[in-house]
Image (spheres, rainbow, N blue to C red):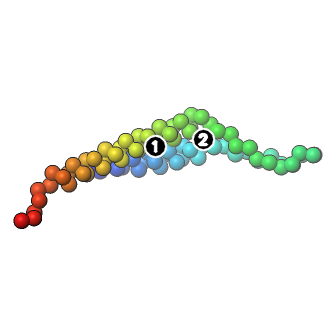
Amino acid sequence: MFGEVVIAVLCLVVAVLSWQNGLVTTSFAAAGDLPAHSATRYVGPWLLLAAFLVAIAGIAGIDAGARALRVVAERPSTRG
């Protein structure tokens, strides 16, 4: 159960880093009659990796939750 939580957290951290690499912003200075502006380019493989890692983190989180609920449900009751 602890392993799934660690996997989920690591996947989310790497997904955030991957998403940041997937967005590339370029700023252009004013030139003549053209005003200054910035453009954002999306890098598909990084964004795809981020989406895949979020899906894996979700599956690992659901698995960890199911295992935790199973452990709680199988615990013998101490009530009299």
Q: Residue at x 51, y 37 (%)?
A: 49
Residue assigned mark 2: 22
Mark 2 to mark 1 CA distance (whole Å): 15 Å
Residue 74 drawn at (x, y percent): 15, 51
2 or 1: tag closer to the N-terminus: 2
Farthest-out residue, bottom: 80
Q: In the rendered view, does 19 fall on the left or right side of 8?
A: right
Q: As shown in the figure, which amino acid type bears the numbered disc 2?
A: Gly
Q: Secondary structure at mark 2?
A: helix
Along the line of sight, the residue nearer the viewer: 44 or 70: 70
Residue 8 drawn at (x, y percent): 39, 47
Q: Secondary structure at mark 1?
A: helix
Farthest-out residue, right: 32
Is residue 44 placed above or below 9 in the rendered structure?
above
Q: Residue at x 89, y 45 (%)?
A: 34
Residue 2 drawn at (x, y percent): 29, 50
Residue 72 drawn at (x, y percent): 20, 54
Camera-side mark, 2 or 1: 1
Q: Residue at x 54, y 43 (%)?
A: 18
Q: Which mark is drawn over residue 65?
A: none
Q: As shown in the figure, which amino acid type bears the numbered disc 1?
A: Val
Position of the C terminus, as image quadrant, is: bottom left
Is residue 59 placed above or below 78 in the rendered structure?
above
Q: In the rendered view, does 64 fall on the left or right side of 42?
A: left
Q: In the rendered view, does 74 fall on the left or right side of 59?
A: left
Q: Residue at x 30, y 49 (%)?
A: 65
Residue assigned mark 1: 54
Question: Can you see residue 55?
Answer: yes
Q: Residues within 10 Å of mark 2 (few under 14, many from 20)?
A: many
Tally the numbered discs.
2
Along the line of sight, the residue nearer the viewer: 58 or 12: 58
Q: Residues within 10 Å of mark 1 (few under 14, many from 20)?
A: many
